[in-house]
């Protein structure tokens, strides 16, 4: 592996942050990039994640610091906490790593990681074990969007044997993580016991697996392109997905659209069982039902012929927030934004001296709002305004003493009518 053609994938990148564990793979990658830097205009940094899972973790930090000092590469060391009770140690450690990577990335900086050809084969086998479809079998792409940044894996065409050859030829030193020998972890089991047998029988197994993954990736990309127009027509401005266009589609077509919509919402790829539950328990539930399906940390709900993908949120229905002079902007709980006075907005009368002002998130009984004849129940008002059930107890309500006055941006009650020019204008400014 004397040539570095595989690094051409980084040709247009000018700022690189390399995930540097100190192991063989990332050591070879960083060494190659140190040489690459001499012929290309590029800013190069490295980041080492201290998981605290090994008694040797502090020694690994020192090794990485010494290596980066030798190659004159700035190094960031980030210590993270790993809680494997929900996702397992492997999943939790990966999540902690990538959270640290996102935090460390500078504007226009590209994250570079050292996964190689044999890692790709392992990922494909793990996807097969899970029963994944083409998207999962596509394994790891060479480039991937990471929020506002890009993740690039330039070693995916290189085998571990080629990396060893490079390391030995350049007399590189690296650390050996003892946990890599623990075959209780699925990836280590494949690496230590399965892939060696497959490679003896079929020497080019990893290359063939990578081709299969690439073909699955091409199929998924083609489906993305073919379904993009119809999917965009079904997605409303608030991100919800219209249900009626799904009703006459085949199961395969419908599931493909649902998977892509959930991916656009930032959700994990749903299983076939999850898709079946979405169809039967949510979409096909009776018209007067208020279905809710929990998928991981998120909820999937139906309202007025549309599907909504909702993040977890706290129950704030019982909270009461006093709002006192000088009426500075009031921060709402659970990232709901602020309520403040303005020159324009919901117009209400100013409170009398004997009236205390508060923000609440729940109202009951009959309410008479301006512009309507007579009172209506709050449930009926929410329905008329088209407010989904889960948002009704997350909408700030202005109270004077125990009297509901207004819902900023939605309505004013007759008790909040302003017949003067000295009233208030109240705005609810939600976070983006």
Image (cartoon, rainbow, N blue to C red):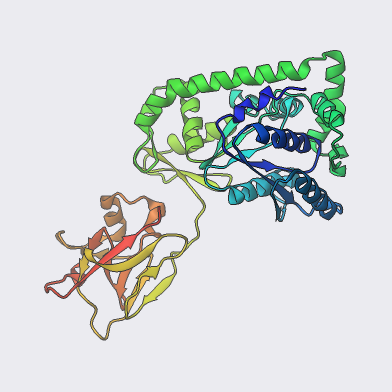
In the current view of this chain or complex, which residue is farthest to the front?
Answer: 38
Where is residue 285, by image quadrant?
A: top left
The x, y position of residue 41, in whole percent, is 59, 36
When the figure is inspected, residue 222 is found, relative to residue 303, above or below; the finding is above
Residue pictured at 35% horizontal, 70% vertical: 329
Left or right of 178? Residue 407 is left
The x, y position of residue 48, in whole percent, is 72, 48
When the figure is inspected, residue 58 is found, relative to residue 288, above or below; the finding is below
Q: Is residue 244 visible?
A: no
When the figure is inspected, residue 53 is found, relative to residue 245, above or below; the finding is below
The x, y position of residue 423, in whole percent, is 18, 73
Residue pictured at 38% horizontal, 30% vertical: 232
The x, y position of residue 345, in whole percent, is 23, 62
Where is residue 188, by image quadrant?
A: top right
Left or right of 205? Residue 351 is left
Q: How many marks?
A: 0
Front in this rendered view, residue 395 or 40: 40
Residue pictured at 78% horizontal, 54% vertical: 52
Where is residue 317, by image quadrant?
A: bottom left
Front in this rendered view, residue 80 or 247: 80
Left or right of 367? Residue 170 is right
When the figure is inspected, residue 97 is found, relative to residue 357, above or below; the finding is above
Quarter that holds the N terminus: top right
In the current view of this chain or complex, which residue is farthest to the bottom?
Answer: 354
Q: Is residue 308 visible?
A: yes
Front in this rendered view, residue 421 or 270: 421
């Amino acid at each position: 592996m004397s040539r570095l053609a595989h690094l051409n994938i980084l040709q247009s990148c000018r700022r690189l942050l390399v995930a540097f564990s100190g192991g063989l793979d990332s050591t070879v990658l960083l060494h190659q990039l140190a040489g690459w830097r001499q012929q290309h205009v590029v800013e190069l940094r490295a980041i080492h994640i201290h998981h605290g899972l090994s008694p040797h973790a502090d020694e690994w930090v020192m090794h990485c610091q010494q290596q980066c000092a030798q190659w004159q590469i700035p190094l960031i060391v980030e210590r993270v906490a790993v809680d494997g009770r929900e996702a397992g140690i492997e999943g939790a450690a990966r999540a902690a790593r990538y959270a640290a990577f996102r935090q460390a990335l500078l504007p226009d900086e590209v994250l570079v990681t050292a996964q190689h050809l044999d890692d790709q084969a392992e990922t494909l086998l793990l996807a097969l074990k899970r029963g994944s479809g083409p998207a999962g079998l596509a394994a790891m792409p060479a480039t991937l969007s990471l929020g506002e940044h890009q993740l690039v894996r330039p070693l995916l065409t290189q085998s571990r044997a080629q990396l060893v050859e490079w390391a030995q030829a350049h007399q590189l030193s690296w650390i050996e993580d003892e946990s890599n020998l623990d075959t209780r972890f699925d990836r280590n089991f494949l690496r230590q016991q399965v892939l060696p047998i497959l490679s003896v029988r079929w020497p080019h197994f990893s290359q063939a697996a990578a081709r299969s993954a690439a073909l699955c990736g091409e199929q998924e990309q083609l489906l993305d392109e073919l379904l993009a127009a119809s999917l965009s027509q079904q997605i409303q401005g608030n991100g919800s997905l219209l249900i009626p266009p799904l009703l006459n589609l085949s199961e395969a077509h419908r599931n493909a659209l649902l998977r892509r919509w959930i991916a656009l919402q930032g959700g994990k790829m749903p299983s076939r069982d999850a898709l079946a539950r979405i169809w039967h328990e949510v979409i096909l539930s009776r018209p007067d039902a208020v279905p809710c399906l929990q998928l991981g940390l998120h909820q999937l709900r139906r309202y007025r012929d549309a599907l909504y993908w909702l993040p977890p949120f706290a129950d704030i229905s019982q909270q009461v927030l006093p709002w006192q002079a000088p009426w500075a902007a009031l921060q709402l709980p659970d990232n709901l934004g602020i309520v403040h006075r303005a020159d324009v907005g919901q117009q209400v009368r100013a409170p009398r001296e004997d009236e205390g002002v508060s923000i609440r998130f729940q109202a009951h009984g009959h309410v008479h709002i301006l512009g309507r004849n007579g009172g209506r129940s709050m449930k009926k008002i929410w329905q008329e305004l088209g407010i989904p059930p889960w948002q009704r107890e997350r909408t700030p309500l202005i109270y004077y003493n125990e009297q509901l006055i207004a819902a900023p941006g939605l309505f004013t009650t007759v008790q909040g009518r302003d017949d003067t020019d000295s009233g208030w204008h109240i705005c609810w400014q939600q976070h983006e």
